[in-house]
Amino acid sequence: MAARAMWKGVIGIGEERVPVKLYSAAQDRTVHFRLLHDEDMVPVRQRLVEPESDSVYEYSQTERAFVTPERDLVLLTREELESIEPEPSRDIDVLRFVPVGEIDHRWYDRPYFLGPDGSAEEYHALVEALRKSDREGVARWVMRKKEYRGALRAGDGYLMLITLRPAEETIAVEELAGPTGKPLEEREIAMAQQLLSILEAEFDPTQYRDEYRERVLELVEAKAKGKTVRRHKAPKARVPQDLTSALKASLAQERKQERKQERKRA
C-alpha cells in the first residue's frame, strides 16, 4: 500500500521555496484491548464522573483548569486557549544549519518523511546539498494547531523531518550523580574491548521486533481457532556480581556459539 501524505508544507530557506508532502516514518503497533464486564463480557466504556455526587458528565460539559504548584486551580476557557494558538501556516522555516551529529539524540522525538509536492528538481537539489555538506537544518513549523521545532535531514535520497523535544523536557547529564566505585583495572578494560570486538556487526533493524506483541497476536489467533495455548515463560536474567564475571560469561557464551556454528559447517 502506498504511503499517504498527512500534511503539506513549503520548506523556506532564505528566498528559496521547496513544496513538500509530509509522511509518517513511524507507526503505532501497540496491542489495544477492549474492556469487558467480567460477568457477562459486555464491552464497557469509561465515563467522566464527578467524585462527590457520582454524577456522569459529557466531555462537552467540561472546562479546563491548570493546577499551580500551590495546588490552586486556574480556570482557562476554550476561547482563551484558542486565542493563544499559533497562526495556521504551511511554512517550514529553516532557521540555521548545523553539522550532522551536533544535535544530541536525546532531543529527537518523532520522525517524518518529506516527499516532493509537484516538481522534484528543487527537492532533489536540497537533498544533495544536505548530503554533500554533511549538514542538517533546524526548522520551525506549525501543524494542526501546534508549533514544532525539528531537524531537517537527508537520507537514502529523501528528506526527513524529525521533531525535537523542548528544552524543558530534556535532562542534562550534569543532573545525574557521578559514577562511584574503584577505578577499573587494565585487564577489565581489555576484556571489555575484546567483548566489543566479538559482538561487532552491521546494524540490522529487522532483528528488533516487539516480541510481546507477537506473542499476544499468536495467543489471540490460537484462542480464536479454539486451540490450546502454550504459555512461554520469559527467561530469568542473572545479575552479574562484577564486570569481570559478566564479561567472562559473555565471552564464554559467544565462543560456545562460534563452536556450534563451526560444527554445523563441518
Image (cartoon, helix red, strand yellow):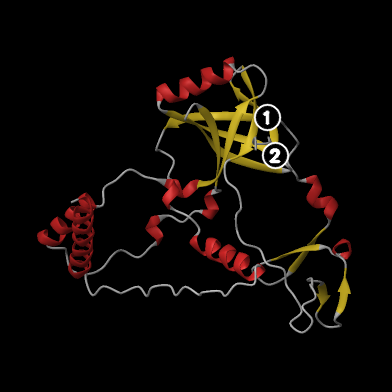
Q: Position of residue 222 (x, y in %)?
A: 60, 68
For the residue labelled by badge 1, is the local secondary structure a helix, a strand or a loop?
strand
Residue holding disc 2? 143
Disc number at residue 230? Answer: none
Between 233 and 164, the one lying in front of the other is: 233
Q: Specify the quadrant of the image occupied by residue 78.
A: bottom right
The residue located at (36%, 45%) in the rendering is 203
In the rendered view, would you say 199 is above or below 251?
Answer: above
Q: Are marks 1 and 2 in contact (CB under 8 Å)?
A: yes
Q: Position of residue 186 (x, y in %)?
A: 10, 59
The residue located at (75%, 36%) in the rendering is 88
The residue located at (85%, 51%) in the rendering is 79
Q: Residues within 10 Å of mark 2 (few under 14, many from 20)?
A: some
Between 215 and 82, the one lying in front of the other is: 215
Answer left or right for 263 relative to 88.
left
The residue located at (49%, 26%) in the rendering is 157
Answer left or right for 205 relative to 146.
left
Specify which label sits upstream in the sequence, 1 or 2. 1
Report the number of numbered marks.
Answer: 2
Residue holding disc 1? 9
Distance (Cα) linking label 1 and label 2:
9 Å
Quarter the N terminus occupies: top right
For the residue labelled by badge 2, is the local secondary structure a helix, a strand or a loop?
strand
Between 202 and 158, the one lying in front of the other is: 202
Dot 1 amino acid type? Gly
Dot 2 amino acid type? Met
Q: Position of residue 235 (x, y in %)?
A: 38, 73
In the rendered view, would you say 52 is above or below 110?
Answer: below
Answer left or right for 221 relative to 40.
left
